[in-house]
Image (tube, helix red, strand yellow):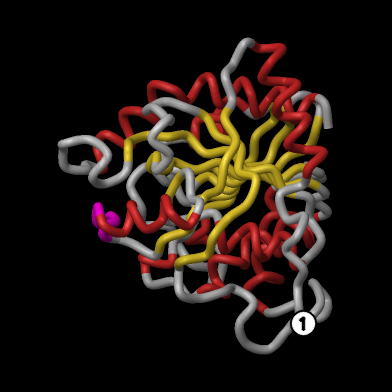
């Protein structure tokens, strides 16, 4: 385990008594779930020696530990993005921290653009698979065999049993839930209309600038994964309007409670 990850593990264990079995990575405008944890403790990324900090809008930049629906959880309230200049190894680090803390299941949320023309702003989509268009991979470089193998199988990265569980909880809550393929794009510029048309041909239903690196890292270290996207805007060229990051934050805020209730219901049944 490298020094940065060990520093984070030590800081979290020193600052919280919780022993998390569930890890949560909360996307743009979706960090409110961390605010409802019981017996919450906070560890700022900036307080961990050598640890990166989050600069993206709507990302608080801290680990939050507590209890949710009877389970010990650790939340990444604000994630890291490749477009911020972080190396892929830094983007993978929080997942490895969670694994070292004893996390057994990882739930990831994100804000995304809708590529599928049948989607609408506000839709929730369970990610069934992804396409990595970020031009890099968090497993590049020397392999840490303590976390996983040199060559990582990605066939069942998005755990089928967790996807089925999400469907069951959504149905019980009366929440419409779509399924689809998420395409990870480097950013920070939004995609062009031509790129979106190409991504649609490739089979993408949604596009975003996160999630793929963390999920690859989770698959590498054997963590079951459930990832849910909130369609906060339709992708470039779908509607006759410019894309605006304020729309992302506003839509996330409007639908956050629905997603928080869904995630809480899923955690309760783990």
Residue drawn at x 71%, y 12% as measured from the top left: 172
Badge 1: few (under 14), some or many (20 or more) residues near its Cα, within 10 Å?
some
- Residue 261 in the image: above or below residue 24: above
Residue 97 picture location, percent across and down: 70, 62
Residue nearest the observer in this picture, 51 or 106: 106
Q: Nearer the viewer, residue 106 or 212?
A: 212
Please identify the quadrant where the N terminus is shown.
Answer: bottom right
Q: What is the quadrant of residue 131 in the picture?
A: bottom right
User: Residue 202, percent across and down?
Assistant: 48, 57
Q: Secondary structure at mark 1?
A: loop
> Where in the figure is residue 4, as x and y percent of width and height?
62, 74
Quarter-of-image position of residue 189: bottom left
On-image quarter of the C terminus: top right
Residue 192: in magenta span: yes
For image coordinates 61% across by 37% down, the residue present is 126
- The picture places residue 105, in percent across and down from the top left corner, at 78, 46
Most extreme residue toward the left, as rendered?
Answer: 241
Location of residue 126 with respect to 177 vertically, above or below = below
Classified by dominant secondary structure, the portion drawn in magenta counts as loop
Q: Residue at x 46, y 66 (%)?
A: 133
- The vertical placement of 186 against 250, above or below, is below
Q: Is residue 183 left or right of residue 100?
A: left
Dot 1 corresponds to which residue?
A: 150
* Residue depicted at x 48% and y 61%: 46
Residue 10 on the magenta span: no
Towards the viewer: 103 or 8: 103
Toward which corner of the image does residue 180 lie, by quadrant?
top right
The magenta region covers 189-193
Q: Nearer the viewer, residue 213 or 77?
A: 213
């Amino acid at each position: 385990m490298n020094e940065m990850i060990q520093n984070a593990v030590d800081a979290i264990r020193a600052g919280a008594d919780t022993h998390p079995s569930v890890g949560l990575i909360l996307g743009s405008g979706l960090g409110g779930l961390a605010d409802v944890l019981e017996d919450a403790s906070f560890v700022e990324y900036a307080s961990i020696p050598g640890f990166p900090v989050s600069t993206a809008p709507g990302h608080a930049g801290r680990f939050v530990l507590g209890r949710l629906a009877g389970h010990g959880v650790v939340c990444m309230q604000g994630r890291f993005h490749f477009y911020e200049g972080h190396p892929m190894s830094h983007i993978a680090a929080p997942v490895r921290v969670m694994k070292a803390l004893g996390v057994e299941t990882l739930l990831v949320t994100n804000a995304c653009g809708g590529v599928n023309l049948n989607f609408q702003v506000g839709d929730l989509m369970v990610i069934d698979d992804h396409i990595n268009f970020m031009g890099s991979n968090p497993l590049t470089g020397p392999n840490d065999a303590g976390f996983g193998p040199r060559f990582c199988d990605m066939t069942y990265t998005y755990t089928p049993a967790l996807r089925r569980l999400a469907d069951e909880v959504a149905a019980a809550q009366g929440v419409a839930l779509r399924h689809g393929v998420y395409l990870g794009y480097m950013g920070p510029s939004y995609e062009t209309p031509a790129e979106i048309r190409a991504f649609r041909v490739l089979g993408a239903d949604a596009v975003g600038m996160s999630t793929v690196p963390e999920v690859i890292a989770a698959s590498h270290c054997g963590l079951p994964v459930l990832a849910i996207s909130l369609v906060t805007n339709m992708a470039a060229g779908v509607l006759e309007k410019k894309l605006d990051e304020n729309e992302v934050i506003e839509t996330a805020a409007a639908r956050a409670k629905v997603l928080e209730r869904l995630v809480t219901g899923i955690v309760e049944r783990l």
